[in-house]
Amino acid sequence: MKETTPIDRNIINSKINELGISDLGVAKIREVVKLVNIIQDASGEKFIRMEMGVPGLEPVKVGTEAEIKALEKGVASKYANIEGIPEFKNEVSRFVKLFLDLDVAPESCIPTVGSMQGSIASFMVANRNAHNREGTLFLDPGFPVQKQQCIVLGHSYRTFDVYNYRGNKLDPKMREYLDTGLVSTILYSNPNNPSWICFTEDELKSIGELAYEYDVVVIEDLAYFGMDFRKNVSVPGKPPFQSTVAKYTDNYILLISSSKTFSYAGQRIGMMVMSDHLFNRRYPDLLRYYTSDRFGQCMIYGALYALSAGTSHSAQYALAAILKAANEGEFNIVDEVREYAERAIIMKKLFKENGFNMVYDKDIDKELADGFYFTISYNGFNGADLLREMLCYGISAITLEITGSDRKEGLRACVSQVQLDQMSLLEKRLQKFQKDHPVS
């Protein structure tokens, strides 16, 4: 154990104990956020913060201007319709046509309190459409809180780390779980949080075909819409489009976040888009919980009504304005967030130069894109011990263990809160880490 580190080791240990965290390896994201906050306060040292996927850019201006205008008109005193204001629904419908090449009616486009509400509402309906099924198959690694949502709801889930089952291996691996007859939904993020892999069109086609064959609903989390910077999906109405399973099945729900692509996280506004087929489909078993057996009706007036009775009125005007600007080619959805790729390039280089390894380092046979996340390990450490040690050097992250990854030695690093003017400090701290922990 080294005697001197940028952050006093005694502070680290005392604050971990103060929060009652018995195992850093399974600490939740917000617990790590809280931990780093109190360590910073106690030590007076600013951290390189890589633990939470929050925007590190300014919100899209057209959105804030539209929201201010809406507030000035008095919408704060009025409940918005649960299904969404017409301006919002129409622009979402246009957006999915122009950027995903999908035809979806405005009726099937619903505002949610962030994609987090979209996922729990999806579980509340899609996991209850058949009495003899149990829950969700997660194609991991993934966002840990979605599993927590299943636990809170009392739903079972199944999971496997998809990294070792890419390409032709994906179909037979998924069948192992689908053949049980107990899976109601399949959920994954694309690009993937935390590995940043992206499913190929062949893989998405395979998932879509399995959704038909086994009659399950695919919940596709598009939190990082357009952020696979290896292709430019920013031109409305022209290919390439954002990749989606919705090209290969009608059994889908898309969760599209405003938090990352539009840097509008604080207003908690997202988009749920389901196929018109699924919206209008009737499941008699839904009558166990809801007053209708129509899927979309249950989603809006059953799940979403019970969760929040709607989404922020003013934020809907904000997102509608952002989408309108994107739809009409006045706002490029990719240009501003490309800065995340620039940060990732620099940060990955610094970690590699100072003895760290990339855990998920390939997208099948291609190099991973540079984007919002990357994954790291260091010889001789498991994930929990590496996180604890890096905290002593003023660097935070989360373990891959909580994401459903098989790679227990790794950490997820998010680039969004690390500003370009902090790169020299990151380099200095990584150099000291390597010096104190030489790899033989």
Image: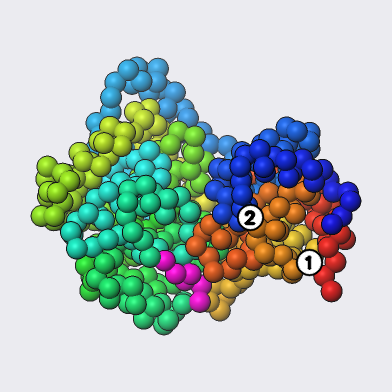
Quadrant in the picture for the N terminus: bottom right
* Drawn side of residue 224 relative to residue 386, left or right: left
Q: In the picture, residue 314 is in which quadrant?
A: top left
Q: Badge 1, how many Cα within 10 Å: few under 14, some, many 20+?
A: some
Query: Which percent across, then down, holds residue 33?
Result: 61, 41
* Drawn side of residue 48 relative to residue 412, left or right: right
Q: Nearer the viewer, residue 132 or 359?
A: 132
Pointer 2 or 1: first along the chain: 1
Q: Nearer the viewer, residue 112 or 376?
A: 376
x 32%, y 17%: residue: 77
Number of numbered callouts drawn: 2
Q: Which mark is residue 282?
A: none
x 43%, y 36%: residue: 268
x 67%, y 64%: residue: 382
Query: Which percent across, then down, holds residue 321?
Result: 39, 35
Which residue type does callout 1 highlight? Answer: Gly
Q: Which residue is mark 2?
A: 413
Quadrant in the picture for the C terminus: bottom right
Spatial CA span between label 2 and label 1: 16 Å
Which residue type does callout 2 highlight? Answer: Ala
Image position of 117 with respect to 150: above or below: above
* Drawn side of residue 356 relative to residue 35, left or right: right
Residue 285 highlighted magenta (yes or no): no
* Drawn side of residue 93 relative to residue 332, left or right: left
Look at the image and give the residue range highlighted in magenta: 159-164
